[in-house]
Image (cartoon, rainbow, N blue to C red):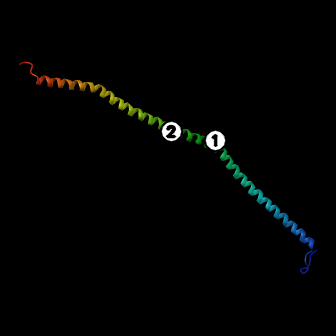
């Protein structure tokens, strides 16, 4: 049956039309929530997988950094000790050289003094 154009629809028809619109809106909201949730979950899952995959590598890199830093400090200390040893070795070399040359120079000075003394003294009258 057709309603005349002048006549207004009754209250029950409005209720059914509103109920249909509400259901459609709820479905749209659910779809939007599920879609956003699914994409968010997919992105979060990818990020977690990346983090899980990279976490051991990050830990290894941190360990390597600590080990390299400790090795660097140990090498620096060893190098400083080597430099000190080399300086002491040079000093001891110089001291040993003077210990060997010192008596020789003393003997030569004594010989020169004796020669000077004997050259000035007249043995025969």
Residue at the far right: name it.
1
Can you tell which quarter of the image residue 14 is in?
Answer: bottom right
* Residue picked out by circle 2: 73
In the picture, measured across the screen, residue 34 lies left or right of residue 117, that is: right
Q: CA distance from mark 2 to mark 1?
A: 26 Å
Give how far across and how far down residue 70 sits, in percent: 53, 38
In the picture, measured across the screen, residue 85 lies left or right of residue 109, that is: right
Q: Earlier in the sequence, mark 2 or mark 1?
A: 1
Q: Report crowding for label 1: few under 14, some 14 to 19, many 20 or more residues within 10 A (C-alpha).
A: few
Vertical relation: 86 (above or below) 47:
above
Give how far across and how far down residue 86 sits, in percent: 39, 33
Vertical relation: 103 (above or below) 73:
above
Can you tell which quarter of the image residue 79 is in?
Answer: top left
Q: Secondary structure at mark 2?
A: helix
**Residue at image coords 90%, 69%:** 15
Q: Secondary structure at mark 1?
A: helix
Quadrant of the snapshot with the N terminus:
bottom right
């Amino acid at each position: 049956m057709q309603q005349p154009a002048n006549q207004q629809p009754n209250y029950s028809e409005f209720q059914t039309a509103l109920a249909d619109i509400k259901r459609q809106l709820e479905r749209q909201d659910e779809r939007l929530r599920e879609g956003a949730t699914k994409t968010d979950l997919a992105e979060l899952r990818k990020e977690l997988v990346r983090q899980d995959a990279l976490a051991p590598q990050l830990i290894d890199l941190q360990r390597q950094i600590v080990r390299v830093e400790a090795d660097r400090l140990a090498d620096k200390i060893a190098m400083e000790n080597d430099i000190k040893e080399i300086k002491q070795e040079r000093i001891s070399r110089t001291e040993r050289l003077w210990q060997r040359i010192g008596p020789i120079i003393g003997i030569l000075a004594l010989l020169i003094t004796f020669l000077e003394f004997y050259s000035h003294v007249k043995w025969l009258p």
